[in-house]
Amino acid sequence: MKQITEQEAFFKLSAMCAAAEHCRHEMSEKMARWQLPDDTQERIMQRLVDEKYIDEERYCRFFVRDKIRYNRWGRRKVEQALMMKRIPRDIISAALSEVDAEEYIAVLRPLLQSKRKTIKAASEYELNAKLIRFAMGRGFDMDIIRECLDCEEF
């Protein structure tokens, strides 16, 4: 693999960050794959942060909204994914607190309703158990799941 210069690495990473939100961890992995020296990685990372190409809080807010609205993930699954990207817990908590329970319910209720149509169960108890297991696998909390299952519209 051809050795990449510091300037070339910065231009490539800044172009990526300009096109979509990225976090420090993703950029560090890229630079490690390019086998850049540690001091070069630190300089590039600092420059990306200084020039606002990377902002962990902004990345986290958009990640949370995207995964909840479009991928229909629950709080636990989003939190776990962000922790794997080494986002600090306080930033994760702040981003997750911006999403209220009504939005989670608006995501989960149609998900459970469509899943309910495909599940085969001998009793209502077994059906609810399967729905709860499904929703927990998607990362939703038990209190939100119960609220959706207990409502009259369901």
Image (spheres, grey):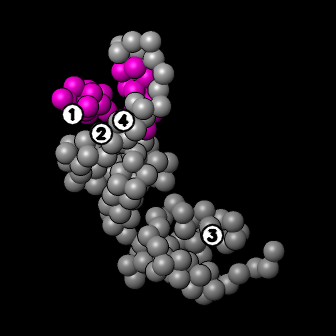
Identify residue for label 3: 31
Q: Would residue 87 be visible to someone looking at this image? A: yes
Q: Earlier in the sequence, mark 1 or mark 4?
A: 4
Q: Earlier in the sequence, mark 1 or mark 3?
A: 3
Residue at 81% across, 74% down: 1
Identify residue for label 2: 109
**Closer to the observer: label 2 or label 3?**
2
Identify residue for label 1: 153
Judged left or right of residue 96, residue 137 is right
Circle number at residue 6: none
Identify residue for label 4: 112
Q: Earlier in the sequence, mark 3 or mark 4?
A: 3
Instruction: Specify the amino acid type for callout 1.
Output: Glu
Instruction: Specify the amino acid type for callout 3.
Output: Met
Q: Would residue 64 be visible to someone looking at this image? A: no
Q: Residues within 10 Å of mark 1 (few under 14, many from 20)?
A: few
Q: Is residue 146 magenta?
A: yes
**Closer to the observer: label 2 or label 1?**
1
Judged left or right of residue 110, residue 20 is right
Measure the C-alpha gap from mark 4 to mark 2: 5 Å
**The residue stretch that appears in magenta:** 127-154
Q: Secondary structure at mark 2?
A: helix
Q: Are marks 2 and 1 in contact (CB under 8 Å)?
A: yes
**Res 144 → quadrant:** top left
Vertical position of residue 79 compared to residue 56: above or below: above
Instruction: Specify the amino acid type for callout 4.
Output: Leu
Q: How far from the left and from the top, in percent, is residue 87?
A: 41, 54
Q: Secondary structure at mark 1?
A: loop
Measure the C-alpha gap from mark 3 to mark 4: 42 Å
Residues 59 and 144: in front is 144
Vertical position of residue 8 compared to residue 147: above or below: below
